Amino acid sequence: MHTSRQRVVRPLLVASAIVFALVGCTSAPRAADSSPDPRLRGEWELSAAQDAYGPLNLWSTAITLTVSDTAHTGGRASCNPYRAHITGSLGVIYLTVVGHETSTCSNQTLLDLESRYLAALDNVHRASIRQDSLTLTGRKISLRFTRAQHIDLAAMTDQPWVLVGEREIGPHDLVPADDSSPARLRFSDTELITTTGCGVARGTWTQDAGEVVVSNFALRSDPASCTASNRAQESIVTRVLGSAFFVEVGPQELRLSNVRAGLQLEFVKETLRDANG
């Protein structure tokens, strides 16, 4: 499969979300509200991190930071999205985590990682940029990010895709989809819509920090009218499509990997499936 992105990641399951405020406390005073240096702006992926307890193990997750203006900065940690305020320039910066969606992670290791990352991010005081690398530092803290690349997703849109199987992310075998009523998926320039075998779900998508991020995701379903197999399929499909996922798109194939759900969906063009019977 020729892909626009290859990523190997492992699991985590996210449940219901609530929002609460986190207020950071650092030894440096917070600056007056102002726009951050334009050189800090952009979409970043965490590539290495260390705090007072040692290095953070990032192998099985994805953590992002998107710097916009002061009031519109944030990202996705190993379990949940977060929001932050940022001011300053190269050299001294002031960054405070101001909002964090919380949910139950099935993996305590990833939940602990998220807590350490957010605590470290809330206590950085300096920023430096070298080529496509952003480093934020504080007392015994170093967070190194690389600039995320936008992927050409034109081949993904305006195509009918049909699910052929799903797997847990990692070295797991593909579980074939229910051939009698497989899920179908279509992306427009801004919207995705999927039939699940039990109902229909849709949402609005954008690309951010290397992932496709879905908002306003809504499912209309009647599980009582479909099979147990299709109910299981619907659960998996909506867990992958309902938040954020990585995309690999080839001439006839589409792979969607939701690192926080620990699940991967494999699709082919509907015309290819029909041709193969």
Image (cartoon, rainbow, N blue to C red):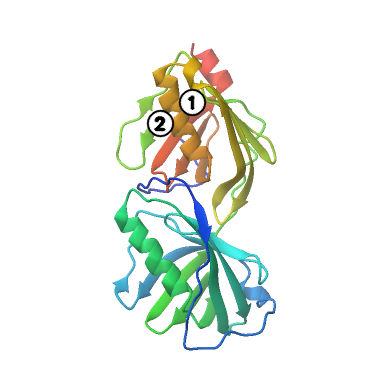
Q: Quadrant of residue 108?
A: bottom left
Instruction: Provide the residue designation for mark 2.
Output: 166
Percent position of residue 165, x then y: 42, 27
The amino acid at mark 1 is Leu
Crowd class of label 1 (few under 14; some 14 to 19; many from 20; radius 10 Å): many
Above or below residue 195? Residue 112 is: below
Measured in 3D between alpha carbons, the distance from the residue under mark 1 to the one under mark 2, in whole angstroms, is 8 Å
Q: Which mark is residue 163?
A: 1
The secondary structure type at the circle numbered 1 is: strand
Q: What residue lies at 30% left-to-right and 57% top-to-bottom?
A: 109
Q: What residue lies at 43% left-to-right and 54% top-to-bottom?
A: 79
Above or below residue 177? Residue 156 is: below
Above or below residue 118? Residue 105 is: above
Percent position of residue 269, x then y: 56, 25
* 272 and 206: which is toward the camera: 206
- Tag 1–tag 2 contact (CB < 8 Å): yes
**Which residue extends farthest top?**
277
